[in-house]
Amino acid sequence: MNTHSQGPESSRSWMVAAVLLTAGIIIGFVVASDLGWLSNGHAVPDSAAPPLARPVSTAPQPVLPGMGSQTFVEIAKAVKPAVVNIYAIKSGKADGAQAAPFEDPFFRKFFGDEFFRRFEQQQPKEKKERGLGSGVIVESDGLIITNNHVVGKADEIRVTLSDKREFKAKLIGTDPKTDIAVVKIDAANLPTVAWADSDQLEVGEFVLAVGNPFGLTQTVTLGIVSALGRAAGIAEYEDFIQTDAAINPGNSGGALVNVRGELAGINTAIFSQSGGNMGIGFSVPSNMARSIMDQLVKTGKVVRGWLGVSIQELTPELAKQFGVSETKGVLVSDVMDDSPAKKAGIERADVITEYDGKPMDSPTHLRNAVAQTPVGKKVSVKLIREKKPKTIDLSIAEQPKSMAQSGEEESAEMAAPTGILSDLDVRELTDEVAGRYGLKSSERGVMVVRVKPGSTAEETGVREGDVIIEINRQSVTSMKTYERIAAKLPKDEAVLMLLKRQGRTIYLTLRP
């Protein structure tokens, strides 16, 4: 009987095998756990998940600061039904179309009705131009807010809801100066978006843009508030919210909502060199849009407040000239006769630091605040005069019709040149300003009060305090002549300027 017994070599082999087996089990357990093959100590069936796929977590998703209990998904679901498509239809004659000649009855009698019938049949048919935009339902009875540039020139406006129903809309009113318009459809119990207080928005806050870019309905994009109080040269009254939430053609009039699903702004424009989104979009703040909408609904027009001052930005140099330690504030360059400011005692060279309880840090900010003030309201204005603080109380008046029609506002003394001269801010050279800069009272021209940092003008050598007396050999004697010459300058050609600086005249050439 032969028996098999383990010798020393066999024992060592078994020991090695046991160690390797144990190590393999441990490694396999760790790998399995890491790959999600084990759950609560139980194996997951092959049919439940692929070997290398992690199971979807059922744990609550983290809530971002300021979002409350809502997620972006919930916000989108709540807002999208209240954002509509707007089709603005403008009728017009097709290219080559013309009115039938010989409309006089004499010619019709001479040629006969058959001739005219054939002539009219040969004329090109009327064509219709369709514009596409967005709108936001703010009242359940069909009141919709959008942009003026979407519907302002339309002969017919049609609105398509999120449930595909289509309505013909009535234009309630428009305000080109803020690019806001209001339309209404005959419907009831519609979904709406609640208004937000746009004054509470902060830079860095999450926002969602909802609209119909390129006709792609119910599109939602996410971004943050990139900046506040932007002026982009799009409308006369601007206080734009800047956002990097994607805004594209067709988004105009759509909703910009905060993390509570409230309407914080009306999407209006983008900054783009390609025609598409480049991460810089602008929205009219909800407080401004709502104020304009309320007036259009009640009266069909917009009435703006009027203070009656010409104002300009307080640059560091001007702040030093007027004894102000900071550039926070707005410099009064002139006070209009018979204005609330004149009657209350506001003077030229005053620096307005606060209006109606709110700090003022730019001319745009003050203009918008005054314009939105109800006529007759008493406000308190804080200012600095001769280095001393002063408070003046006054009542806001209605903006004169002549000023409203011409587009002149409190900053009417400031020019708005285009092209290469847009790098310069200039103002009328009055006797007072001439004396302040050591110039003769007989000097004529316009003074450069600001040069855009990093611009061609700055690199060429134009400085604040320079007096422009010639552009392309044409005399500049006033703001009007400056604006007239600037408007006719070729955009792609160099501009020859004659400047007076500290009693000396110099020529400079600005190149695009």
Image (tube, rainbow, N blue to C red):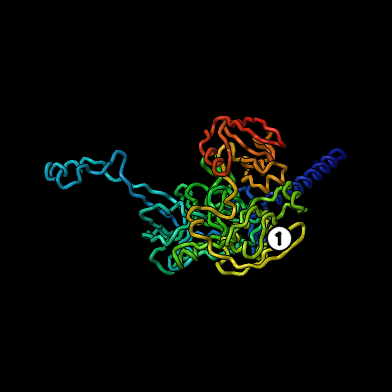
Q: Is 274 in front, or is 178?
A: 178
Mark 1 neighbour class, 10 Å CA radius: few under 14, some 14 to 19, many 20 or more:
many
Work out whether residue 2 can be spotted. yes
Q: Would you say 91 lies left or right of 224 here?
A: left
Classify 30 as above or below 2: below
Q: In which quarter of the image is residue 379?
A: bottom right
Q: Would you say 483 lies left or right of 162 here?
A: right
Residue 62 in the image: state x and y as whole percent. 67, 59
| Label total for image | 1
Residue 110 in the image: state x and y as whole percent. 11, 42
Q: Would you say 124 lies left or right of 490 here?
A: left
* Residue at the extreme right of the image, as rendered: 8
Task: From the image, tell me which residue sits under label 1.
Answer: 383
Classify 74 as above or below 280: below
Q: Would you say 9 lies left or right of 511 here?
A: right
The quadrant of the rendering that contains the N terminus is: top right
Q: Is 91 in front, or is 226?
A: 91
Residue 203 in the image: state x and y as whole percent. 66, 54
User: Please, what is the three-letter code of the amino acid marked with disc 1?
Assistant: Leu
The quadrant of the rendering that contains the C terminus is: top right
Residue 456 in the image: state x and y as whole percent. 64, 34
Q: Is 86 in front, or is 175?
A: 175
| Numbered disc 1: secondary structure | strand
Q: Is 446 in front, or is 331?
A: 446
* Residue at the extreme front of the image, as rendered: 442
Work out whether residue 290 can be spotted. no
Please name the residue shown 56% across and 42% down the image.
417
